[in-house]
Amino acid sequence: MDHFGIGHAMQAMVRVYIQGARQTGRTTSLLESLKDGDRVVCATPKHAGDLERRCRQRGLQVDVVVVEPQQAHDDIFKRAPAVGRTVFDHAWIELYYQHVLERAARDIDFLQRETSGFGTAHMETREQARQLHRWGNS
C-alpha cells in the first residue's frame, strides 16, 4: 500500500489534466505536424479511423495503426520501422500514462506485501486463515 497516497494523487492529476486538455486543438496540431511517410499510433480503432479520414482530407500519406497502450512494448516492435517519424496520438499517450501509474501502484503493493515480515498485517492474515480453516469457507 502506498502509505502516502502518492500513486492516487498522480492518477488524479492525470485525470484532471485529461479533462482540462479537451478541445484544445491537440489533434489539429498533430495533423499540421504530420508529413508523408509518418506513422501515427492510436489506442482505438475509432480514433484511428477518424485520424485516417482527416489525413486523407489533407492529402497526407500516413500510416495509422492501432496498438493498445498496455501492449505497446510487445506490439510496437513487431512492425517494420516507419518511413518517417512514429508519433503517438494524445489519447494513446494519456491511456499509456494511466496504465503505467496503475501498474506502478500494483507493483508497490506487491513489493510491500512480499517483503514485509510478520507484523500486524501478517498476523491479521494468519488469523483470518485460521478462522476460515476452523469454520470452513462457506
Image (tube, grey):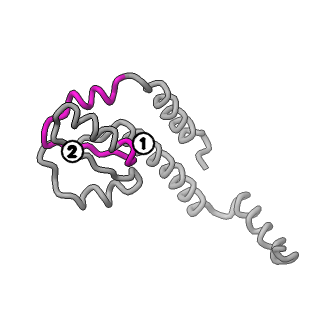
- Pick the residue in front: 98 or 7: 98
Any mark on residue 78, and which? Answer: none
First along the sequence among labels 1 and 2: 2
Judged from the image, the secondary structure of the residue bearing numbered disc 1 is helix
Left or right of residue 7, residue 74 in this image? left
Inter-mark Cα distance, 1 to 2: 20 Å
> Badge 2: few (under 14), some or many (20 or more) residues near its Cα, within 10 Å?
many
Q: Is residue 105 above or below residue 133?
A: above
Q: Residue at x 22, y 37 (%)?
A: 56
Camera-side mark, 1 or 2: 2
Tell me the residue at 84%/77% (across/down).
136
Q: How many marks?
A: 2
Few, some or many residues within 10 Å of mark 1 (<14, 14–19, 20+): some
**Span highlighted in magenta in the image:** 25-47
Q: Residue type at mark 1?
A: Tyr
Q: Which residue is mark 2?
A: 39
Image position of 61 (left or right of 21): left
* Outermost top residue: 24
Question: As drawn, is 85 to the left or to the right of 67?
Answer: left
Residue 73, above or below 51: below
Q: Residue 48 in the image: x percent, y percent?
A: 33, 44
x%, y% of residue 96? 40, 45
Report x, y in % for residue 107: 51, 55
Q: Label 1: which residue?
A: 97
Image coords of residue 58 (percent x, y)? 20, 31
* Residue closest to the eye, 57 or 112: 57
Q: Nearer the viewer, residue 81 or 132?
A: 81
